[in-house]
Image: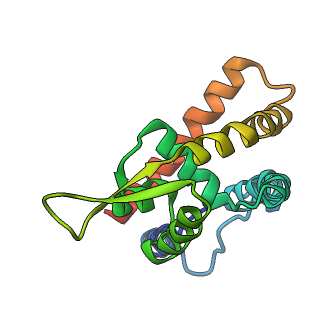
């Protein structure tokens, strides 16, 4: 799941939160004003994420990867040795989907699973040299796509956008708790 995309749990939390808010603020006989698709945040975020991911997925496919593979490589590059549970959490994927992706990545030589010496049920996922090379091959294209997406935005506008999106995400995650 890329930034802006919602997991099933997040989607459920949003739906429950929205229903609760509707229930509290409902005014019988008066429909809530719909701002239209162009101003409806879930729609706009979905369209922006879909557009960004579509181009990137084509690039990744050419390199034998998926978005999840990319996220795993990116997160392990910054925090090597994460466990499956932590990696599933930060990549926004469920553990079953992530485990299948890790198996593919392990066969490709990108990652290795190292059992925890204390708890054999836990494995640290480590980035292998082939995974580092694969990440380095795709990174310039990913950065180019990023630059295309933010073209025309000042650095301050980009920082504001990222800050606002992180606040929206925090709002959604707060409803889950």
Quadrant where the C terminus is found in the figure: bottom left
* Residue 115 falls left or right of residue 49: left
Q: Nearer the viewer, residue 26 or 143?
A: 143
Query: Residue 52: where, in percent of width, then height?
Result: 79, 50
Q: Residue at x 75, y 61 (%)?
A: 64
Task: Establish if 162 lies above or below 49.
Answer: above
Q: Nearer the viewer, residue 35 or 113?
A: 113
| Viewer can see residue 2 | no
Q: Nearer the viewer, residue 160 or 32?
A: 160
Query: Residue 28: where, in percent of width, then height?
Result: 55, 80
Q: Residue at x 51, y 66 (%)?
A: 102
Q: Quadrant of residue 54?
A: bottom right
Query: Residue 101: where, in percent of width, then height?
Result: 56, 69
Query: Residue 79: where, in percent of width, then height?
Result: 41, 40
* Residue 89 falls left or right of residue 105: left
Q: Quadrant of residue 115?
A: bottom left
Task: Establish if 165 lies above or below 144.
Answer: below
Q: Nearer the viewer, residue 33 or 174?
A: 174
């Amino acid at each position: 799941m890329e930034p802006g995309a919602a997991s099933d749990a997040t989607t459920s939390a949003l739906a429950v939160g929205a229903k609760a808010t509707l229930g509290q603020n409902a005014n019988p006989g008066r429909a809530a004003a719909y701002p239209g698709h162009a101003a409806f945040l879930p729609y706009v975020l979905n369209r922006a994420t879909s557009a960004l991911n579509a181009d990137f997925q084509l690039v990744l496919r050419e390199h034998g990867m998926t978005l999840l593979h990319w996220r795993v490589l990116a997160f392990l590059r910054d925090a090597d040795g994460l466990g499956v549970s932590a990696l599933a959490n930060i990549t926004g994927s469920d553990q079953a989907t992530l485990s299948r992706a890790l198996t593919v990545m392990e066969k490709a030589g990108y990652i290795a699973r190292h059992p925890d010496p204390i708890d054999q049920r836990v494995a640290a996922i480590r980035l292998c040299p082939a995974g580092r090379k694969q990440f380095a091959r795709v990174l310039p294209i990913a950065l180019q796509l990023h630059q295309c997406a933010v073209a025309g935005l000042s650095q301050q506008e980009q920082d504001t956008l990222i800050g606002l999106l992180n606040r929206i995400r925090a709002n959604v995650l707060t409803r889950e708790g």
